[in-house]
Image (cartoon, rainbow, N blue to C red):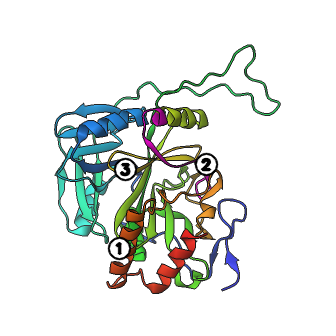
């Protein structure tokens, strides 16, 4: 186990897989989804949710006392659907199938029923439960919102190339207009089982694996996973999965135009008193320029731009997981981003870890040691 197979040094990770490691894709998946359609949440205060959403860059297409639909400027479905609930919680993700036959095929293979979706969304879907207990909806033939006005890219003078003369650059301090939903990151106590479930049922493929330093022989603990669109490039990750002491939502990411949109939009959010969690910086895996924020309910959301796009020919990269390795440049990862921003949060995380260690899952004592090394790196 010393010779990397298919290594892609300097491309998007340190090296390729070693012999016998996880291939990062299923041999014969049930279907291949084409994109992440939307995310669903429940929250008790839709007015506060709407206020932050508009400042973050969404546009509301449905806003009733019981339901809120938030869209980007790209054509398609809403990015986020929020329904009124007694407490704040992430309900699940919806993935777009290539066609209705795929929804029916997946329903038959999993023993679930395909049903019409609410009229506000249209189309049909099948609801599955992944190994974390989370709901995963796969949909087709939904109503498509038309493209709306997007922020226009600035004309840039880059190096010695001069494209702007006798004109100034004045990015407005305004919301960074969301273009589309990019990805969602989830944590699982049964990481490998959950990873295989998504690869086998939805046909997703891994772009990058991360492993704990000194524990590579035990396998990966995080994967960045993309849609398999054949030779058509897709986002470096549509879904990211990480091993951890709880089954939970970590964050979701929304594409905006460029760095100016991220920076000026961030100043707008700060002016309104919202909390930046971490940023601005550029990631390693995925290469996105990022900026993370906390919404009024404490959910972590990300503005991003300039992400990697891979086609089906690229094999997974492998790299050790470190906190310092999360960004090529930018400030160090904050305690808030790592989920231990306050003494109360730190104590709660310790209790979560202790509880997980008493259960039958993949998060054992050795994995805990690896995670603690990451947090201190």
Q: Secondary structure at mark 2?
A: strand
What's drawn in magenta, residue-wise?
269-287
Residue 248 drawn at (x, y percent): 35, 64
Please state which of the two labelled residues, at mark 3 or mark 1, is closer to the viewer. Answer: 1
Residue 335 drawn at (x, y percent): 50, 60
Residue 325 drawn above or below residue 189: above
Q: Disc 3 or 2, which lies upstream in sequence?
A: 3
Residue 97 drawn at (x, y percent): 34, 52
Query: 139 or 368, which lies in front?
Result: 368
Residue 349 drawn above or below residue 147: below
Residue behind mark 1: 352
Please state which of the two labelled residues, at mark 2 or mark 1, is closer to the viewer. Answer: 1
Q: Residue furthest top?
A: 166
Query: 316 or 247, which lies in front?
Result: 247
Q: Residue at left 59%, top 25%?
A: 171
Residue behind mark 3: 98
Residue behind mark 2: 281
Q: Disc 2 or 1, which lies upstream in sequence?
A: 2
Whether residue 31 is visible to the viewer of this picture, yes or no, is no
Residue 117 drawn at (x, y percent): 19, 46
Residue 123 is inside the magenta segment: no
CA gap between label 3 and label 2 equals 34 Å
From the viewer's perspective, tell me whether residue 276 is left or right of residue 377: left
Q: Residue furthest front?
A: 343
């Amino acid at each position: 186990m010393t010779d990397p197979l298919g290594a892609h040094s300097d491309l998007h990770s340190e090296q390729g897989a070693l012999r016998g490691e996880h291939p990062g894709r299923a041999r014969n998946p049930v279907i291949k989804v084409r994109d992440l359609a939307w995310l669903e949440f429940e929250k008790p205060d839709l007015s506060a949710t709407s206020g932050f959403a508009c400042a973050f860059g969404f546009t509301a297409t449905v806003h009733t006392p019981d339901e809120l639909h938030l869209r980007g400027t790209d054509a398609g479905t809403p990015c986020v659907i929020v329904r009124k609930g007694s407490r704040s919680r992430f309900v699940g993700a919806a993935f777009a199938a290539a066609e209705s036959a795929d929804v029916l095929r997946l329903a038959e293979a999993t023993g679930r029923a395909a049903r019409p979706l609410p009229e506000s969304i249209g189309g049909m879907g099948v609801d599955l439960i992944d190994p974390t207990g989370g709901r995963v909806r796969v949909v087709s033939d939904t109503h498509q919102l038309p493209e709306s006005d997007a922020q226009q890219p600035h004309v840039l003078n880059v190096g010695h190339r001069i494209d702007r003369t006798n004109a100034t650059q004045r990015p407005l301090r305004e919301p960074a207009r969301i273009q589309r939903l990019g990805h969602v990151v989830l944590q699982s106590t049964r990481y490998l089982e959950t990873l295989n479930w998504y690869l086998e049922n939805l046909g997703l493929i891994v772009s990058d694996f991360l492993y704990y330093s000194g524990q590579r022989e035990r396998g990966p603990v995080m994967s960045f996973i993309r849609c398999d669109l054949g030779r058509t490039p897709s986002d470096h990750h549509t879904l990211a999965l990480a091993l951890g002491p709880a089954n939970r939502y970590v964050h979701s990411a929304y594409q905006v135009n460029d760095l100016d949109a991220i920076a000026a939009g961030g100043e707008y959010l700060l002016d309104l008193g919202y909390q930046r969690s971490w940023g601005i910086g550029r990631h390693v895996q995925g290469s996105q320029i990022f900026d993370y924020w906390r919404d009024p309910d404490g959910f972590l959301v990300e503005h991003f731009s300039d992400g990697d796009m891979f086609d089906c020919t690229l094999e997974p990269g492998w790299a050790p997981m470190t906190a310092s390795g999360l960004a090529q440049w930018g400030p160090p990862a904050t305690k808030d981003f790592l989920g231990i921003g306050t003494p109360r949060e730190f104590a709660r995380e310790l209790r979560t870890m202790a509880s997980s260690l008493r259960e039958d899952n993949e998060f054992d004592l050795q994995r805990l040691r690896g995670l603690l090394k990451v947090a201190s790196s």
